């Protein structure tokens, strides 16, 4: 496995370091602007790629310099340590619009995949594994390149955000509806609601209870005090899981909490129960001193998006994820 991609005519590869962060950020912003995407999309992509520059998650990073010493392309690999349900090898890459169709994109992808597979070979076979490319900016050229390398579209979702510093929605629970905070002893009941709520979603994840609990509550970002089981009488009918990641907030210069996952059982939908849980969570996150709440919604779920918009959330970026299985391991069915 080469430490760097092979040089191409007019370009020389070298290792990328944290000192290159500003130039790499500008690269991602240029890619977003060329595709007509807002700057927020480029910043989101850069935030992910930055994990490949340094730290425990980094597995290698390289940049291509043209003959004038200008940074024309970037590639990197990272493996987020906070993800417990699978080994997710993230492949990062971007090429300045003026430098495309010269082999840089293909060189990045081939090199990054080789590094990812080498890193994966050293890990135990105790969980599923996947190679994944997350991007907010995907044109036809990039889609074709990923397809040639065996990557397939896994899902497309939108990032939505809501300011917590102004008035928040007033959604009191209807009579007979109560909210219970997460406790480990309630894990099976949370999971049962999750399984029923997501059973109607296209391509519903096939989580086991253990896998779901680890994925949603096993990281330091999990906030049990802002995660709820919603009950109507004696029935568990909805759930919400919240995360706050101080390290990620510090890295991005944000003060945000995430509504990581929520759902309502099919028979109880259309009664505003999701809005009740979200309103309570927003107030709790604000009480915790956070300025912003964020969530992701799949583009094939317009009903959920309408609910979030009514509660003051707005779309700030669209993100596509392309995946490829790794060394014969089963890919975990979750985004």
Image (cartoon, grey):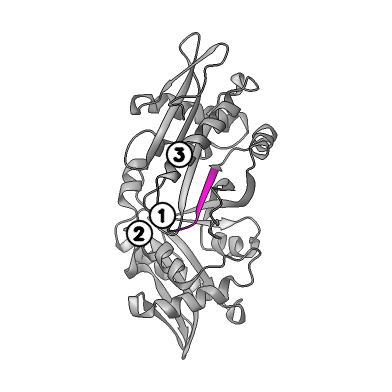
Residue 97 as seen in the image, left or right of residue 90: right
Say which residue label 2 marks. Answer: 219
* Range shown magenta: 127-133
Residue 180 as seen in the image, left or right of residue 203: left
Question: In the image, is residue 22 above or below residue 316?
Answer: above
Q: CA distance from mark 2 to mark 3?
A: 25 Å
Q: CA distance from mark 2 to mark 1?
A: 7 Å
- Secondary structure under tag 1 reads loop
Depth check, mark 2 against mark 3: the one in front is 3
Q: For residue 118, which numbered disc appears in the image?
A: 3
Residue 25, by quadrant, is: top left
Q: Residue at x 50, y 24 (%)?
A: 5
Is residue 131 shown in magenta?
A: yes
The x, y position of residue 199, in whole percent, is 61, 72
Depth check, mark 1 against mark 3: the one in front is 3
Tell which residue pokes out farthest to the top in this image. 68
Residue 100, by quadrant, is: top right
Residue 267, by quadrant, is: bottom right
């Amino acid at each position: 496995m080469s430490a760097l991609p092979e040089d191409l005519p007019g370009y020389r590869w070298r290792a990328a370091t944290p000192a290159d962060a500003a130039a790499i950020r500008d690269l991602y912003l240029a890619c977003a602007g060329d595709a007509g995407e807002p700057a927020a999309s480029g910043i989101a992509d850069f935030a992910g790629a930055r994990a490949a520059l340094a730290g425990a998650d980094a597995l290698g990073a390289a940049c291509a310099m043209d003959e004038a010493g200008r940074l024309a392309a970037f590639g990197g690999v990272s493996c987020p340590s906070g993800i417990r349900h699978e080994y997710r090898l993230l492949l990062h890459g971007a090429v300045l619009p003026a430098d495309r169709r010269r082999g840089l994109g293909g060189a990045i992808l081939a090199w990054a995949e080789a590094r990812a597979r080498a890193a994966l070979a050293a890990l135990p076979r105790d969980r599923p594994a996947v190679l994944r490319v997350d991007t907010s900016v995907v044109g036809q050229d990039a889609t074709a390149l990923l397809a040639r390398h065996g990557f397939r579209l896994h899902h497309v979702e939108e990032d939505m955000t809501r300011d917590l510093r102004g008035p928040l929605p007033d959604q009191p629970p209807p009579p007979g509806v109560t909210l219970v905070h997460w406790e480990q002893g309630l894990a099976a009941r949370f999971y049962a609601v999750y399984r029923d709520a997501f059973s109607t979603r296209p391509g519903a994840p096939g989580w086991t209870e253990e896998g779901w609990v680890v994925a949603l509550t096993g990281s330091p970002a999990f906030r049990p005090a802002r995660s709820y089981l919603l009950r109507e009488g004696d029935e568990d009918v909805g759930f919400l899981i919240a995360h706050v990641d101080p390290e990620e907030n510090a890295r991005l210069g944000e003060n945000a909490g995430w509504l990581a996952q929520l759902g309502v059982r099919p028979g109880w939908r259309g009664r505003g129960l999701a809005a009740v849980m979200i309103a309570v969570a927003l107030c709790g996150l604000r009480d915790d001193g956070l300025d912003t709440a964020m969530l992701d919604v799949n583009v094939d779920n317009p009903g959920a998006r309408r609910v979030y918009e009514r509660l003051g959330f707005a779309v700030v970026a669209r993100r596509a994820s392309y995946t490829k299985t790794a060394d014969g391991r089963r890919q975990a069915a979750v985004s």
